[in-house]
Amino acid sequence: MFAGPVTFLKSAPALQFLPDPVAPEVAFAGRSNVGKSSLLNALTGRNALARTSNTPGRTQELNFFDVGAGPVLRLVDMPGYGFAKAPPEMVRRWRFLVNDYLRGRQALKRALVLIDARHGIKEVDRDILAMLDAAAVSYRLVLTKADKIKASELADVTQRTAAEARKHPAAHPEIVATSSEGGLGIAELRAAVLDAIG
Ligand code: GDP
């Protein structure tokens, strides 16, 4: 499916700008710099679909990408979180936008929460996990930048992350380890996306 058309549809800075829910949606969340843009590009086999932007102000939007004719599926790039210097007002807006979307969007079939393999789940990630649990949106944890650590460290962080996932009611117990650089786990990630809409 990802070999067909993948196109940017629109950015929604607030709920009234969401597109009509004509296709199932899979959303991607993660702290800023976790490698979300790179992973969306690797997933879709595009070089510059999701723009790599670390400017706080520009990222407070939900970005929608249509996959396949119809479209068959929509990928939703959720605004990053955990900016070191984020003003409280920005954090508040992020929570409102993300919570409203998670709670109110029937088309949303699954979320993928990206976690930097070098760090594992951090305190900044726990907010989104709690929001997903509360909204009963099924989600899966995805480790990024796996090429940056040794195989033994990857095995260790995967195990720790899986142990924490099991404590979250809406989380899938199995972790997907990925690298946008080497291509590790990208096929598995595609399968996880297709499984969500199947
Ligand atoms: P975003 O802010 O979550 O969208 O993160 P980006 O995709 O912009 O990535 C942040 C930085 O991490 C960039 O410098 C990327 O080149 C780098 N990066 C992203 N994914 C990987 C990966 O799988 N391996 C390595 N080595 N670097 C990565």
Image (cartoon, rainbow, N blue to C red):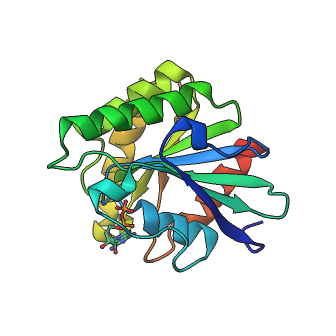
Residue 10 coordinates in the image, percent (x, y): 60, 57
Q: Residue furthest right?
A: 70
Which residue appears farthest toward the left when viewing the image?
Answer: 85
In this rendering, the answer to whether 170 lies above or below 60 is above
Quadrant, the C terminus:
top right
Q: Viewed as shown, does residue 5 lie left or right of 127?
A: right
Q: Position of residue 47 (x, y in %)?
A: 53, 80
Residue at 43 percent across and 26 percent down: it is 131
Residue 163: image quadrant is top left
Q: Is residue 182 above or below residue 53?
A: below
For this orientation, the residue located farthest to the bottom is 47
The quarter in which the N terminus is drawn is bottom right
Of residues 84 and 166, the one nearer the viewer is 84
* Residue 27 horizontal/vertical position (percent): 56, 46
In the image, 9: left or right of 71? left
Q: Is residue 166 visible from the viewing direction of this image?
A: no
Identify the residue at horizontal 59%, vertical 43% (top origin).
17
Q: Residue 45: which quarter of the image?
A: bottom right
For image coordinates 37% across by 64% down, the residue present is 146
Residue at 50% across, 67% down:
50
Q: Quadrant of ligand 1?
A: bottom left
Q: Where in the figure is residue 178, as x and y percent of width and height?
A: 46, 62
Q: Nearer the viewer, residue 24 or 57?
A: 57
Asked if residue 153 shows in the view, the reply is yes
Tally of marks: 0
Foreground of the two, 101 or 44: 101
Res. 66 image quadrant: bottom right
